[in-house]
Image (cartoon, helix red, strand yellow):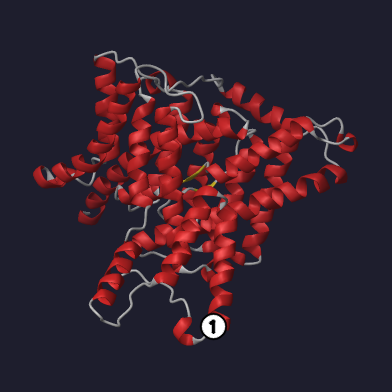
Amino acid sequence: MHKISKSFPEIGTNILIGLAVSIVMLNLGAALGILSGRGAFAGMLSAAVIAFVTSLCGGTRIQGSGLTAPMSTITAVIVAYSLEKLPAEVAGISADHFVNIVIFMSAIFLFLFSIFRLGRLIQYVPNLVVSGFMCGIAIIIWILQVEILFGVGRAPLEGDSMLNFLIAAITLILAFFVPVLIKKFFPRGASFLPGTLIALVVMSVLAGVFKLDVEYLLITNTLNSFSDFVTLVSNQIPNRISADILLLAAPFALQLAALCYIDTLLTSLIVDKIRSSKTRRNKEIAAQGLANGLVALIGGVPGAQSTVPSVLTVKEGATMRVAGVAAGVFILLNTIMFANLMNYIPQAVFIGILIKVGFDVFDVKPFGAYARTLRRSYLNKKTKILGHREMGFLSGTALITAFIDLILAVGAFTLSFIFYNRFFKKNKKIVDYVPR
């Protein structure tokens, strides 16, 4: 009885963490849904489905799967192709139906990856490349948030620019320091009062009370009944499928599946690294396939295990699958039932939260190890923790991830690491960094 009573607070804590994470995932879903060309509402529905299914069935116990920038970018290419370049031999199929076929085929490829147990291949990715990948993702997060906040290459946030900046800055400060204060003055509340949720609520209330002239989240609900949902699904089923269509869709589907594989398993490595856990990789790939297959049925946007919500879920202290499941449920509820309340949240709040997440993602430990190596070299001590070659591989992975392409970064530096160490002498080999 005592053990059962102890589990209820833990469940409650994980549900609250799921609520906090769902807000960030909802915003990512809307933004990446627009990026994909399938729309904000489709993005948010997809975020709910992916989070729920993968958290319930996946091989990474504590995670936050959803829409990711690489997957949404590839989807945008497929959407553009389906609208502008479908050849005459597949005339009669709509652009939306072609995209749905591609997404569903990518789900099949993911199932095949799982059946043939290809998840083990990710173990050949060195820790240096994983750390570089983490740092590259953090750089992407920071750059995107700065661009949004200051309107670099796009329209800036609506309203008073200084107020938007202050909201983002105060949110960031609260996200960092509120958990510290709670832990010091109210230790028992530290585990069930996530800093990001407190920051979001406080800033939303302040913005509403003082009627601040800033940009707020805007959600338009198109599902008002179960019959609307049935209609949505029925409208996404292709009216014709042929060998020509499948052959045309297959390369796009394989690209989506490969990207989902890399995105998911690299993020799972990050989660495992933070939590000292071990992902069941083939199970995780299968769960991603199931989620993306369901996404195709609602005309949604494919996704993968995502670094931002995954790290946020872990860092907020989630200990149970229910955190991710709850996040999926809250995304769906917020999308369908509470759109009006969501519209009171300033957009700049998400900027502050995501900048905080960038700090959580960035792997600072190798830089400390490199600094210690330089210090020991200066003191004429021969012990090397992490040298110039290792730092070059890490930095190269980070920069190519951030500014060129994730798949290229991981593939090129993993192969370079393997071949370099095979052909060079022992004293010139690159030593894979093991965090202490």
- In screen coordinates, is 308 left or right of 211? right
- Residue 205: x %, y % from top left: 26, 21
- In screen coordinates, is 84 left or right of 372? right
Front-most of 82 and 112?
82
- In screen coordinates, is 391 left or right of 417? left
Front-most of 250 and 393?
393
Give the residue drawn at x 60%, y 35%.
Answer: 36
- In this rendering, is residue 116 above or below 178? below
Give the residue drawn at x 51%, y 30%.
Answer: 153
Give the residue drawn at x 30%, y 47%.
Answer: 316
Give the residue drawn at x 64%, y 36%.
Answer: 76
In this view of the protein, can residue 60 be seen by the observer? Answer: no
- In this rendering, is residue 348 above or below 368? above
- Residue 169: x %, y % from top left: 28, 33
Q: How many numbered tags mark residues here?
A: 1
In this view of the protein, can residue 132 be seen by the observer? Answer: yes
Mark 1 is surrounded, within 10 Å at the Cα level, by few (under 14), some (14 to 19) or many (20 or more) other residues, namely few
Disc 1 target residue: 424
Front-most of 399 and 6?
399
Q: Report helix, strand or loop for mark 1.
A: loop
- Residue 141: x %, y % from top left: 43, 43
Q: Where is residue 37, by image quadrant?
A: top right
Residue occupying the far left of the picture: 185
- Residue 60: x %, y % from top left: 46, 57
Residue occupying the far bottom of the picture: 426
Q: Quadrant of the C terminus?
A: bottom left
